[in-house]
Amino acid sequence: MKSTGKPEPTVTIDTSGYAVATEEIRSEAKRLLLEKIVDAVVGYQSGRRKGSAVPVIITDPAQAEQLVFSPACVNNLSIYLTKAKKEIRAKGKLAVVAKGCDLRALAGLMGESQFKREEVVIIGVTCAGVHSAGVQPNEPLTSATIAKKCRECSVHIPEGADLIVGKLPLLPDLTPTEKELLEKLDAMTPGERWEYWKEQFTRCIRCLACRQVCPFCYCEQCLCDRGRPQAVDTSPRPSGNMGWHIVRAMHLAGRCSGCAECERVCPMDIPLNLLNRKMAQELKELYQYEAGLTPQEKGPLTSYDEKDDQSFIK
Amino acid sequence: MSRIGVFICHCGENISRTVDVEQVAQAARQMVGVTYACDYKYMCSDPGQTLLKKAVAEHRLEGIVVAACSPRMHEKTFRNAAQAAGLNPFLCEMANIREHCSWVHDDRVEATAKATDIVHMLVERVRKNKKLIPITVPVTKRALIIGGGIAGIQAALDIADCGHQVVLVEREPSIGGHMAMLSETFPTLDCSQCIMTPRMVDVVNHPKITLHTYSEIESVDGYIGNFSITIKKKARSVDMAKCTGCGVCMEKCPQKKIPNEFDKNLGFRPAIYVPFPQAVPNTPVIDREHCTKFINGKCGVCQKVCGPGAVDYEQQDELIVEQVGAIVVATGFKLYDITEKPKGSAIKGYGEFGHGKIPDVIDGLTFERLASASGPTGGKIIRPSDGKEPKQVVFVQCVGSRAREKGISYCSKVCCMYTAKHTMLYKHKVHDGQAYVFFMDARTPGKSYDEFWRRAIEEEEAVYIRGMVSRVYQKGDKVVVMGSDIAVGVQVEIEADLVVLATAIQPRDGADTLAQKLGISYDKYNFYSEAHAKLRPVECATAGIYLAGACQGPKDIPDTVSQASAAAAKVMTLFSKDQLEREPIVARVNEKFCVGCLACKKVCAYGAVEEKEIRDRQGNLIRVVAYVNPGVCSGCGTCQATCPSKSVELDGYTDEQVMAMLETL
């Protein structure tokens, strides 16, 4: 399903702030390590291909010069802070480079007892947007190459970080493609919607990249890998695929912070973030709740309030 | 497990009327793992249970499915039978083919098919059942009583006399409750103070009772046998250890015009006061809201005149923690204040009765204070407005009670009797006075109650008018009561000197908040709910918490005292053992797979989930996982449903069992 809006003229986005961010990340990382405020910094470094970026964990102040920030810094680094990443957590106190969207995941993880606020230094980075999946890393950031989630980003400047680096340029108005898609889905009949998702999920090859990249899929033993009893058929067949994606959507409801990493890594281009956003929308309508705004002890799905919607009880 | 016996009950005709039980038995014999199946008219009867025990021995059964009624009804019966037959009781399960099948269906063929399915599911569950051993938890043999009225006092004395420690917590500065306010009590007309105050003294002198007055329950943690109670002792401003109760401070307090709550605002009290002369403990308390010292700092007389130096303006509220094993809730009642409509409540007021506006329209408790020898008038019945002796008094029953359209549909139970008592007390003090009573009907089911009521009419000449009152208004110095006499079918108007309203009994303010702290249930009026209306009338559904007195529903003194003693007996039953047995249907965490997100801890309604640190041999923290305290867990299974990695499982309801059950369908 493609957006049916008129093709918009390509707009180039000012990325001068990224160089500023890079410089500031390097100096802050160096300072944090030198002053022994943290033991390791989770950030991005340049990849082998020109213009690309990959996650890196540095422990030596001298390594701080490797750190970069660019539109190719697509990864959500909060995943490295979950309890499952024992070897990283074992390094001691961590600092992490976080875009606005990543910070929402960090807030969610704190609410789920994955780490405490005082255990992590968050280097918030102002971000004009990152590349969409499949874009060559050295391509300039334009309205054509920017990720869908960034088109309607509301957290260009992260909130709640320990320090903020970078400079936000003047941003062009971009059409919210994903929101339009969601509206189109909402307009369908339940039958049509079911067909749409069935069609999407038949493509799934169960590589489980969506699970591996998700900061909230931190279980060391996924229930979908269990054999006895088997909750979800593990082979890539329609019934098991549907089962897996429903389990995934349900487990993320009220938790997903919308980083869209699942959709980025999906080799079969299944619009997974669309499903996440649909769940988020339901949560907002039912409980006026948005995940990841602040670290919360209890989300709406783990608490009971007499004012909760009871209409489902007939 | 492969040697399962299936026992299908006809339940007289309750099941066999709609379900072909023989066919179900036949189908059961074909199920994998079933060795033996039979049906019988009354499986729960002695011959039925014998049949089960015999079959276990004859067919060497290793598991049992009894297809009958709800497990709430007879699970214990059959598990005991299984145990008697030498099986672990938790290898016996019930398939509910009565409430879930025969009672709700008409079609015999379909109902039989459904009953077969239900049996099949339970067979699958039993195949994967494991032997479970009951959990034992130690019992702290110390009881908490909340409320120091006659209910709390009776329960406290009974438990303490049995040799157990008791902690009695009372919100007011003195124990005694409403009974201490009454003049004389029905049906014998003995003086309330005379029978009440010795009990109060017994409490304070009892070596096993710790009394906390002017205190409230702050929070409740723990579970049956092991509660931890935080009590807030409000600042009394008087050191209880030093005070001798001489009363000089009260005499000298310059602030003397504070309406006396104990006398229903008919008299006055100083800012440092005891609620009534016979108060227990006899230690005054400073009402900081009205004390000049606390308002502007310009007094301090009481401190100066206090010989032992007991007055302490600096005293602070204090939190103390008490460990107890059982709780008796005896928080009592209040009278429905009809002057205005309570905010946000379905209950409507009675503006038309002028209560609160006309001074000579009073409620029953106010009349008690007027008639009481220790009351503000020394027992002389006079009108609050001008102090004259009323010659015509109108009593109105059922004000608020039994008035569905006004929001309260229950009967307050005591008003018929106390109104009859009021007419007598009045007649005894004002010989030429006339009492009129408007009533719907007289409810006098108690020992010597009806005789008492007849006496009010026949000997004490009270005029009973069957009918309702529509309006009460002031006319000169008279109060006119407009009502109907349905026996004659006429409207009546009585020009009275005093009107006494028997207003409804309601639970105390804050009853709901306390219930939430305790985790007990309450009805729409905030009366606490018993576990079973007939068979468990003094127990709460929450284990280890018991009810006494009017907090559970309107009650008179004899009923309250009986219930308090019953609650005490329940507490003593609990304390008769050192260890408490609990059902082993509890959740367990698979620590290997738990990721410590602690979602289970957030959803647990019983506070059973704790954090557990896993350390290596050197003592280094490896990770934090969830731990379910089996002593607290109630086996509701919410954690199991919540756990994202399915690392929590409920014994007897494991995922494997539930999936196997579903797969039979």
Image: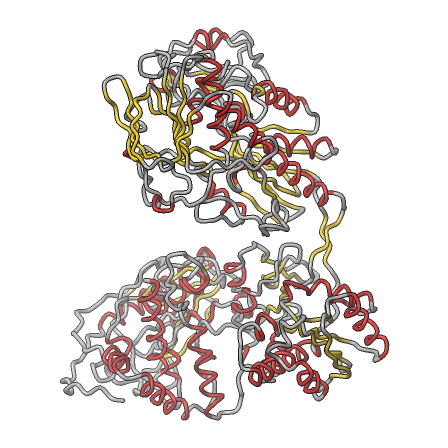
Query: Which image quarter: residue B244?
Result: top right
- Rendered location of residue B531, percent (x, y): 59, 51
In the image shown, does B658 or A12 lie closer to the viewer?
B658
> Could you tell me if residue B654 is visible in this image?
no
In the image, B657 versus B222, the foreground residue is B657
At 82% from the left and 75% from the top, the residue drawn is B56
Q: Nearer the viewer, residue B256 or B531?
A: B531
Residue B268, horizontal then vertical, whole percent: 40, 15
Q: Is residue B21 left or right of residue A37?
A: right
x 54%, y 82%: residue: B107
Where on the picture, by quarter, is residue B113?
Answer: bottom right
> Is A166 above or below relative to B22?
above
Q: Is residue B296 above or below residue B542?
A: above
Relative vertical location of residue B612 with respect to residue B239 in this rendering, above or below: below
Total count of labels: 0
Q: How is the image coloured?
A: secondary structure
Assign the C terminus of chain B to one quadrant of the image. Answer: bottom right
Q: Quadrant of residue B24?
A: bottom right
- Left/right placement of residue A132 relative to residue B212 reads left
Query: Can the viewer see residue B369?
Result: yes
> Residue B137 in the image: x percent, y percent?
71, 52
Residue, far right: B58
Locate residue B262, reporting x and y percent.
45, 22
- Where, quadrant-wise, is the N terminus of chain B in this rendering? bottom right
Q: Nearer the viewer, residue B549 or B221?
A: B549
